[in-house]
Amino acid sequence: MSNEKNIQELGSMKEILEGAIQREESSYRFYLEAKQRSRTPAEAALFDALANEELVHRQKLTSQLEAILAQMEIDRALSYDVY
């Protein structure tokens, strides 16, 4: 695969992951708000667990995004014409 094509594909993946991270953060806030409105300790515990899962998802996506950004930098460096 050419470096230019690889950069384009990684760019699309970057956008997808950035959107997914935003959705995880939104879901996290949603579950925290639901926890605050809970009527029972069991409800609060459920929403707390769901909020924490969103944090785990966000961290996994962030790690993937960081790897893609690093690869994009490598690909840019490899495609740089020094002549």
Image: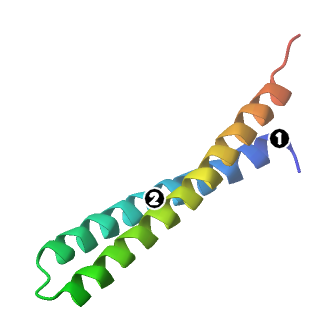
- 74 vs 50, nearest the viewer: 50
At x 65%, y 41%, the residue is: 69
Give the label on residue 78, or none. Answer: none
Q: Is residue 19 above or below residue 75?
A: below
Q: Position of residue 45 (x, y in %)?
A: 29, 81
How many neighbours does mark 2 have within 10 angstroms: few (below 14), some (14-19), or many (20 or more)?
many
Residue at position x 32%, y 84% in the image: 46
Q: Quadrant of residue 30?
A: bottom left
Colour approach in the figure = rainbow
* Residue at figure coordinates x 31%, y 74% from the top left: 48
**Residue 33 image offset from top left, x and y in percent:** 18, 70
Asked whether 66 or 54 is in front, the reply is: 54
**Label disc, if present, on residue 21 of the rendered structure:** 2
Classify 10 Å Cα crowding around label 1: few (below 14), some (14-19), many (20 and above): some
Q: How far from the left and from the top, in percent, is residue 62?
A: 55, 52
Name the residue beneath numbered marker 1: 3
Amino acid type shown at disc 2? Ile
Q: Is residue 74 left or right of residue 61?
A: right
